[in-house]
Image (cartoon, coloured by chain):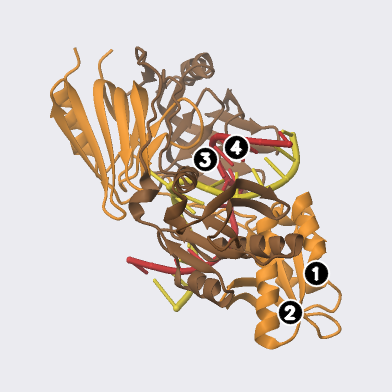
Chain colours: A brown, B orange, C red, D yellow
Amino acid sequence: MPNNEDAIKFVRSHLATHVLVIYAVARVSYNGRAKANLDSNPFLIIIKPDGTFMVHGSRREKPLIWNPPGSRTYIDAQEGSVALLSIRASPAERVMADLYEVDFVGAFDVEHTDNKVMGTESDLVAWLVDHPDYIEKGFVVLEREYDTAVGRIDILGRDANGRLVVVEVKRSQAGPDAVNQLLRYVDHLLQRRGEKPRGVLVSPDISPSAHFMLKSNGLEYLKVSKDLTTLAEKGGSQPSTKPVPDFYSWL
Amino acid sequence: MPNNEDAIKFVRSHLATHVLVIYAVARVSYNGRAKANLDSNPFLIIIKPDGTFMVHGSRREKPLIWNPPGSRTYIDAQEGSVALLSIRASPAERVMADLYEVDFVGAFDVEHTDNKVMGTESDLVAWLVDHPDYIEKGFVVLEREYDTAVGRIDILGRDANGRLVVVEVKRSQAGPDAVNQLLRYVDHLLQRRGEKPRGVLVSPDISPSAHFMLKSNGLEYLKVSKDLTTLAEKGGSQPSTKPVPDFYSWL
DNA sequence: CACTCGATTTCGGTC
DNA sequence: GACCGAAGTCGAGTG
């Protein structure tokens, strides 16, 4: 029979420093912005040193129940089970896990590593600003990431005829929301400057309804090559460190 | 010195049935809709039987690099390392991990469990439809989740005076996007029916800029109690099963 | 399969 | 800490 006391000690001593992996039969509940419950079943529970608490099932990328970074984890013995508690201060949220059978606890020393993702919308905007003729011959950039009362305009410029142009950029297929955003900006500038600007949506693809909305509002569409959306820059992370695994199990 | 061959065999034999947890020093790269790279560092790699592939660091809830459910995983020996490959067919995306030092491999038999989350926007809409007077005395619901060319209207109804009312519901703080959506629907109905409807945004909170946009467009705001956003119904999951943990390590 | 939108969105940036 | 908008968004529902 497993020794819960040892497991509890083990978890406590590694909570702040290691990524903990717990395999246990547990009943889990979440209560906060929403509510959810899991009946007693074997789950994989992962607790990170930053407070992230996750209960994973056998499918999907997202945990079934979780608490975000910054939460605090508590563990204690209970009548016939181990109580695992994760508390987030604000908004108040709590995850409670009753572990009826703890079959594995591992502590893994994982370094903090940031990775830089390349090919984001910001990258595409930057490229377009550097290559204004790609948008249109004679296009001149006035502003980039231009904040207004109704949102941030990706690119504001003038065409060869000197007419104001609002450019909204999407790195993937544009939907109704993107058209909405563009409309918002065009209306705002019309009211603000008394000059009706052109509105151009730039993306590698657009959904049918979004295209319909675009056309019926006199806006324009510029399709960009999919290659442009994965512009490669360079990014990296930190140097290697020695792994220090440690675990506790009875089998 | 660890035996990579055994680790590879172990992974292969559990890929389809277990949640695999691998702790290794690895260099990881992702190439697909975007790109990302991780230098050689100890990471926690989790592979689920549904094809989900995740590389977790010591912080945050989301993996540093991942492939979604439906991806295929391959593992093979390499010169001085173990090559782990995850391929997603469409869109074409691949995650490559070079494991330079495999320190732990665990296979955990996690049952598939669905959990029902309570307190979603859909729950709130349902409650409002059942309690139309909460929106406004004399309010009559005409349609719910009403599809139009510009999107789905949460609730369409008429007020005590017989005037058309569009209701947009948010379960958390409403931002500019919500106002945008509502505006879109109001405009659409005006054009479509030649009748200018009232637009009402319902949420427990609203951001300052969203409220400003709302007012300046003649729309209305109805604040609902936060309690309403966590309406409790009932939900559960499946019965318990026996855990069958299995792992492989050298320490 | 594609489209649409909610999400305990999460996450990063900015004020 | 609040606000704002992107995300390799993910994931569910619908057609």
Which chain is disc 2 placed on?
B
Residue under circle 1? Answer: B135
**Is residue B140 or residue B163 the one in the foreground?**
B163
> What kind of element bears circle 1?
helix
Q: Would you call the spot at circle 4 few (<14 residues within 10 Å), some (14-19), or many (20 or more)? A: many
Residue under circle 4? Answer: A95
How many numbered dots are placed on residues in this image? 4
Q: Which mark is residue B157?
A: 2
Disc 4 residue type (three-letter): Val
Asked if the residues shown at circle 4 and circle 3 are in contact, with their CB atoms under 8 angstroms apart, the answer is no
> What kind of element bears circle 2?
strand
Quarter holding the N terminus of chain B is top left
**Is residue A138 or residue A63 the one in the foreground?**
A138
Residue under circle 3? Answer: A27
> Whole-percent x and y of residue A12?
53, 17
Please, is residue C15 above or below residue A138 in the view?
above
Asked if the residues shown at circle 2 and circle 1 are in contact, with their CB atoms under 8 angstroms apart, the answer is yes
